[in-house]
Image: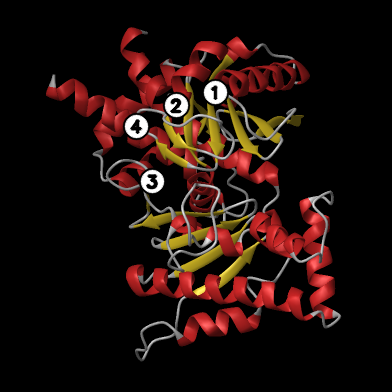
Amino acid sequence: MAFGHQKVESRRLLLREISQNGPLPRIDLAERTGISRATVTSVTAELLRGGLIEEVPRDSRGDESARGRPRIDLKVVGRAHLIAGLKVADRRISMVLMDFEGRDVANADHMMPTNRLSAQALAEEIAVGLNALADKAGYAVSEVSGVGVGLAGVVDVGDGIVYWSPSLDQRNVALGDVLGQRLGIPAYVDNDANLVALAELTFGIGKDHSDFIVITIESGVGMGMVLGGRLYRGARGCGAEFGHTKVQLDGALCRCGQRGCLEAYASDYALVREAASVGTVTQTESTADAIMAVLAAAKAGDHTARTVLERAGKMFAMGLANLVNIFDPELVILAGPQMSFDHVYSDAVIEQMRKSIVEIDKPAPDVVVHRWDTLMWARGAAAYALEFVQDTAVEALDDV
């Protein structure tokens, strides 16, 4: 039993290494993973027989050391599996279909009738969108090996339970099970900010950092955290709820039902709500148009608009300073579509953050802006599902 477990772990580790850094020769795999050359040879033979990897000749142009037999690299077989990734936000579901190598096959958006649904209604909308996406690429949903779903809220990834989400009209929903039953394929649910952090770690700005924090700002304020090169989720799988940290006792009402949350001041819906309450914008405007109107009014000297933005920046700077003081990350990444608006990451806001962190004779962590589009969020969800599909694939080799 122990030997069998060790064999599966070796398969998983080698497949991950090839997936993330390949094509690679066997000798490099041994050096990178610490697995013996003999074990690398036997385990990669199993992965080859299972159709998960393939041999490709190394391009030796310019390599004067190349002699005799051509060197062979190992790479993942893209056609081995299909993986879908979905980002649920407001009334839009952004979707991407990837192959086993992580390359895009197709992408699409699906619009929903409203921004809050029951779990069953959301599963139906996802099913309609995913069927259209698969059909666009010439596949059936049944040919997809797994789907990753990211949405705002508090999510226990271990059980696929969404304790609360602005996209759902119910609490404590086993959304992973609901989706799996409706779609007929495994579904893996996570907080959308976690998936942004995973995407940054896999193929983004954070790839060369072991400790960093990603803050997402859109209809809410989210956070994903990587510590020691791994995504941190907390003991219950629902940690890093930055948007719901408290910055004001008995403060503004947050959509989570509590008061004084950072999100209730810094998110786009909070800005629009405050601006609408004093007539700077109207509730009929789209969120993006409303924010643009607030920014324009502030630049034109409107006192109320400036007050709304300054308070949002002040609260956001306070929250960032608290994160840096607690976790001391190498890097802070501000990500999301709303990065086109600079009211929460202006020089003044970042300087205010720096003044509030513990002073030592080392520079403060870098704060970098990464303007993600919604498709990149979906890619993060697909990268999340890919890990599960890889694990299932290596375990299934015992049945081959």
User: Residue 15 occupies which quadrant of the picture?
Assistant: top left
Using the image, tell me which numbered label, if any, was put on residue 54. none
Point out the frontmost of discs 4 and 2: 2
Dot 4 or dot 2, earlier in sequence? 4
Return the residue nearer the eye: 155 or 312: 312
Q: Residues within 10 Å of mark 3 (few under 14, many from 20)?
A: some
Instruction: Please indicate whether residue 258 sits to the left or right of residue 333 in the image.
Output: left
Residue at 31% across / 12% down in the picture?
398
Q: Under tag 2, what secondary structure?
A: loop
Q: In the rendering, at what x and y percent does residue 178 appear?
A: 49, 18
Residue at 55% across / 37% down in the picture?
150
Q: Under tag 3, what secondary structure?
A: helix
Residue at numbered disc 3? 28
Dot 1 or dot 4, earlier in sequence? 1
Amino acid marked by disc 4: Gly
Using the image, tell me which numbered label, if any, was put on residue 119. 1
Disc 1 versus disc 3: distance between alpha carbons?
A: 46 Å
Q: Under tag 1, what secondary structure?
A: helix
Q: In the rendering, at what x and y percent does residue 280 appear?
A: 81, 66
Residue at numbered disc 2? 173
Using the image, tell me which numbered label, if any, was put on residue 158. 4
Task: Single out the residue that lies furthest toward the left.
Answer: 2
Position of 253 relative to 77 (above/below):
below
Q: Residues within 10 Å of mark 2 (few under 14, many from 20)?
A: some
Amino acid marked by disc 2: Val
Return the residue nearer the eye: 108 or 153: 153
Please say if the residues under marks 4 and 2 sit with CB atoms less than 8 Å apart. Answer: no
